Image (cartoon, helix red, strand yellow):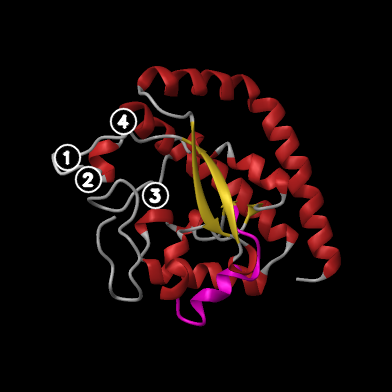
């Protein structure tokens, strides 16, 4: 990505994040109250994720899961802990809105490969790791082409394709297609999972 493209992308990110946070402020307040009423715990979910070049940052989302443990003190599965409100927030992608704060801070972009778990960094092939050559995004090329119904390998191919074919027009197309996908609530989860099975390396996926 050329310097002028990086600058233009950053300007669009800041403008989009500021407008989004301003317009969504009433919704933020309502969702925060509903999350607190629905279950005890923090309103925001915070987790370290790999950013540009794999450098860690803390991502912000609305909390969608309850802290429920089994008799041995272990957390129950994502599907069992996903609250009714949390399911609604995920299917509408409202849980992702606090990531606008990450965009404003410069940790993320509006468009880019989704930030996954830190533990995945050592499981990528050299080609798959190229997804970290750009900032992670709230939405991305994989999200408009299947999202969580794709295999991990297909997702990573689409992420690397985005890295190699980036343009401002592509970002605009992805943002528009994301809006359509959210309205249709498409690709929210893989069959039998709250979101996706954990990535264990190519051909070695298991449940999260």
Q: Is residue 67 left or right of residue 28?
A: left
Mark positioned earlier in the residue sequence (3 or 1) = 1
Q: CA distance from mark 1 to mark 2?
A: 5 Å
Report if the CB atoms under discs 1 and 2 are less than 8 Å apart.
yes
- The residue positioned 41% from the left and 28% from the top of the image is 41
Instruction: Name the outermost residue toward the bottom.
Output: 126
Where, by quadrant of the figure, is residue 66 drawn? top left
Residue 96 spot, x, y in % from top left: 52, 40
Relative side of 200 to 169, left or right: left
Lower position in the chain sequence, tag 4 or tag 2? 2
Q: Which residues are magenta?
A: 124-137
Please report the residue visible at 31 percent of the width from the left and 30 percent of the height from the top: 83
Element on which disc 2 rests: loop
Is tag 1's residue or tag 4's residue first in the polypeptide sequence?
1
Task: Rate crowding at label 4 as few (under 14), some (14 to 19) or many (20 or more) other CA atoms within 10 Å.
Answer: some
Please give the residue where the numbered disc 1 appears in the rendered image: 70
Query: Residue drawn at (77%, 44%), measured in percent from left and top?
Result: 14
Q: Which mark is residue 74?
A: 2
- Circle 4 or circle 2, nearest the eye: 2
Image location (x, y in percent) of residue 157 = 48, 73
User: Disc 3 designates what residue?
Assistant: 187
Mark 1 lies on a secondary structure that is loop
- The reply to whether callout 4 and callout 2 are in contact (CB within 8 Å) is no
> Mark 1 to mark 4: distance in Å?
16 Å
CB atoms of marks 1 and 4 within 8 Å: no
Reading the image, the residue beneath label 4 is 83
Specify whether residue 135 is painted magenta: yes
Residue 54, quarter of picture: bottom right
């Amino acid at each position: 990505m050329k310097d002028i493209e990086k600058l233009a992308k950053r300007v669009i990110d800041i403008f989009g994040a500021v407008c989004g946070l301003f317009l969504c402020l009433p919704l933020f307040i309502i969702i925060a109250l509903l999350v607190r009423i629905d279950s005890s715990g923090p309103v925001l979910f915070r987790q370290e994720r790999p950013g540009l070049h794999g450098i860690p940052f803390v991502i912000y989302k609305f909390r969608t899961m309850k802290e429920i443990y089994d008799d041995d003190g272990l957390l129950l599965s994502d599907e069992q802990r996903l609250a009714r409100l949390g399911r609604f927030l995920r299917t509408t992608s409202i849980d992702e809105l606090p990531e606008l704060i990450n965009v404003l801070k410069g940790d993320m972009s509006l468009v880019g490969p989704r930030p996954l778990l830190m533990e995945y960094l050592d499981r990528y092939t050299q080609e798959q790791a190229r997804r970290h050559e750009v900032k992670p995004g709230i939405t991305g090329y994989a999200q408009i082409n299947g999202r969580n119904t794709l295999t991990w390998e297909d997702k990573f191919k689409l992420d690397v394709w985005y890295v190699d074919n980036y343009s401002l027009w592509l970002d605009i197309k992805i943002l528009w297609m994301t809006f359509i996908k959210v309205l249709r609530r498409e690709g929210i989860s893989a069959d039998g999972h709250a979101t996706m099975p954990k990535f264990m390396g190519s051909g070695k996926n298991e449940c999260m």
